Image (cartoon, grey):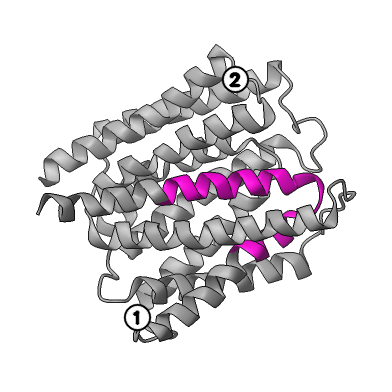
Amino acid sequence: MCKESLQPYVWMLVGSFCFAWMAAAAHALRSSCGWQIIALARSSMPLVLGMVLTVLGGARLVLFSPRILWVRSIAGSISLVCTFFALTVLPPSHVFTLTSTFPIWVALLSWPLYQERPSRQVWLSAFGSVAGIALMELSAASASLEGAETAAFPRWLAVLCTLLAALCTAVAMLGLHQLQHIHPWAIVAHFSGVAFLFSLAALLLGRPSAVPPTLPRIETLLLLLAVGSTATVGQLFLTKAFTSGPPAKIAVVNLMQVVFALVLDVLLWGHPFDALTLGGMALAMAPTAWLMATQTRVDG
């Protein structure tokens, strides 16, 4: 009984670890290929494996219904495109810190969607996260972070895209918990198919990122393979966690992405993190954890 109740949390922990490595591989590719190509690699492999494993597992692929599946896939696809754009400009730990504010967006979205007026706690949480983000940006302005000066796009645009990704993640997570009756691989396949179309549209309609190839071709291909494979495993475990466990509690474990990404940022690239940056990250994440933990006690 105890082992079964712990499974969703273990799945989320493994998924967070995989996504941290996915972000590290994507960040490593920032100087060798455009973010649209990285997004295509992230969505194409889960699409193929998701379809194959769904069929082999005897489950049914889903396409047109239920409607909430399309809401989840479209919102998740917008989040994916914005996130991979940001990963080529910002350190992965910064991206995950900003996207980890999605539970606050969930609470705020409940106002127009469910006529549930946000409590004082929600407003305090939102204010705390904004203050933390401001501290992070103040630190970035006073100290040059690797890639911030030479990136093809301005940092502020990447920050806005990351916050948009958090908003879209909130919409996706609101729908994901309502899909327990659909096989996890079928959900992964549907989301990955929609995300592939969004990534392809970004490549065809957007301005390609013109970056000189600085990595050997074989290394670039291996990194793209790493992005796709870690995303596939991470997406499966995240889907299994959110469809089988309480979303508020699972989301708390999801914050470990920031810790994993921060360790990788330091070990792989030696990104500097001064007291102001770390304080801003903690201030941005703490209200989210506080909001989810309190909501868990209320729901329990």
Residue ranking furthest to the top: 275
Q: Nearer the viewer, residue 179 or 10?
A: 10
Main SS, magenta region, reads helix
Q: Quadrant of residue 81?
A: bottom right
- Residue depicted at 46% across the width and 56% down the height: 234
Q: Which residue corresponds to mark 2?
A: 273
Is 232 rendered above or below residue 287? below
Whether the magenta-drawn stretch holds residue 215 is answered as: no
Tell me where residue 33 appears, x and y as whole percent: 79, 54
Whether the magenta-drawn stretch holds residue 21 is answered as: yes
- Residue depicted at 47% across the width and 60% down the height: 233
Depth check, mark 2 against mark 1: the one in front is: 2
Q: How crowded is mark 2: few (under 14 residues within 10 Å), some or many (20 or more)?
A: some
Q: Which mark is residue 66?
A: 1
Q: In which quarter of the image is residue 90?
A: top right
Residue 65 in view, yes or no: yes
Is 134 rendered above or below residue 67? above
SS type, badge 2: loop
Q: Indicate left or right for 189 with 299 as reference.
A: right
- Give the amino acid type for the residue marked by disc 1 in the picture: Pro
Marks 2,1: beta carbons within 8 A: no
Q: Indicate left or right for 169 with 43 as reference.
A: left
- Residue depicted at 13% across the width and 39% down the height: 297
- Give the amino acid type for the residue marked by disc 2 in the picture: Phe
In the picture, the quarter occupied by the C terminus is top left
Tell me where residue 13 appears, x and y as whole percent: 36, 46
Q: Indicate left or right for 97 with 178 as reference.
A: right
Q: Which stretch did the figure color magenta?
A: 15-42
Cα separation between marks 2 and 1: 45 Å
